[in-house]
Each structure stands twice: as structure tokens, then as C-alpha cells.
Image (tube, rainbow, N blue to C red):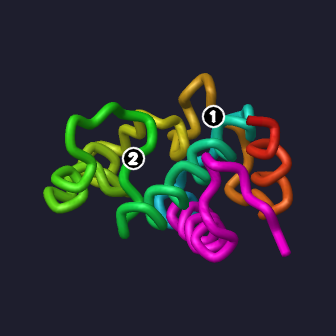
Amino acid sequence: MTINQPNQGSDKSLEIMRNFSQSYAKRTGTYFCQDLGVTSVVIEGLAKHKDDLGAPLCPCRHYEDKEAEVKATYWNCPCVPMQERQECHCMLFLKPDNPFAGDQQEISFEQIRSETNEY
């Protein structure tokens, strides 16, 4: 049995968000941050919100009312700024010319948990 940290999503949600992130990056021609620790924390946050709120609300913003934001859908990943302008506040999906963009569009479940187990 896996014991997750309080800030972690379930294994199931983490795998769903990991797969989504990889396929979305490939489909949009974007790349994960060169610091895969950033990528790990963001994907983990999306998984946690999916478990807690029923939707992958952007984990990098402050909300007065998370449930209302989920219903509004604007900040549900991929958020409207990402969909419309390829602008990712979380640095999860970066254009190749972004100075923080790495060359990866894949990340393993184990790599994410290794990073987020430290918090």
C-alpha cells in the first residue's frame, strides 16, 4: 500500500494527469520546464485538485473559492490562456523558445513521486 504525502494526489489521478500532460505537450509542440522538479510539482498539484475538486484546477494560483473556479472552468488545465495563446503560468507547457524550456515531453510516475515525496 502506498502512503501519499498530504499534498499528493492519488496514484490514479497522478497517472491520469501525467498522461494528459505528456500527450498535451506533444500535441501542442510544447516542452516541460528544464527543471523537472517544477513539472513534477505542477502535475502533482493538478492530480491533487482532481481528487479534491473533481477537476485539474491550476495549482499555481490563489483562489478565494476553488469550487467556484472549477465551475467557471477558466483555470482548469489546460487553462484558457494556454489554449488561446500557449501561455502557461505554471511553466508546465513551454514553447521551445522559452529560456526555461527543456527538451522533455515525458516524465515518469516515479520521477514525479520522487520529487514530491520531499515536500
Foreground of the two, 85 or 40: 40
- Give amino acid for label 1: Ala
| Of pointers 2 and 1, the one earlier in the residue sequence | 2
Q: What residue is rendered at 37% in x and 69% in y? A: 54
Residue that mark 1 sits on: 101
Marks 2 and 1, how far apart in space?
A: 19 Å
Left or right, 8 with respect to 94, comes to right
Q: What residue is rendered at 74% in x and 40% in y? A: 36
Vertical side of 66 occupied by 99: above or below: above
- Give amino acid for label 2: Cys
Left or right, 110 with respect to 65, comes to right
How crowded is the residue under tag 2: few (<14 C-alpha within 10 Å), some, or many (20+)? many
SS category of the residue bearing label 2 = loop
Q: In the image, which residues are magenta?
A: 1-24
Left or right, 113 with respect to 48, comes to right
Vertical side of 86 occupied by 60: above or below: above
- Res. 32 image quadrant: top right
Query: In the rendering, at what x and y percent does residue 95 appear?
Result: 51, 40
| Quarter of the picture holding the N terminus | bottom right
Vertical side of 79 occupied by 27: above or below: below
How many numbered circles does the render carry? 2
Residue that mark 2 sits on: 58
| Quarter of the picture holding the C terminus | top right
Query: In the rendering, at what x and y percent does residue 45 appear?
Result: 54, 49
Which marked residue is nearer to the observer: mark 2 or mark 1?
Answer: 2
- Res. 73 image quadrant: bottom left
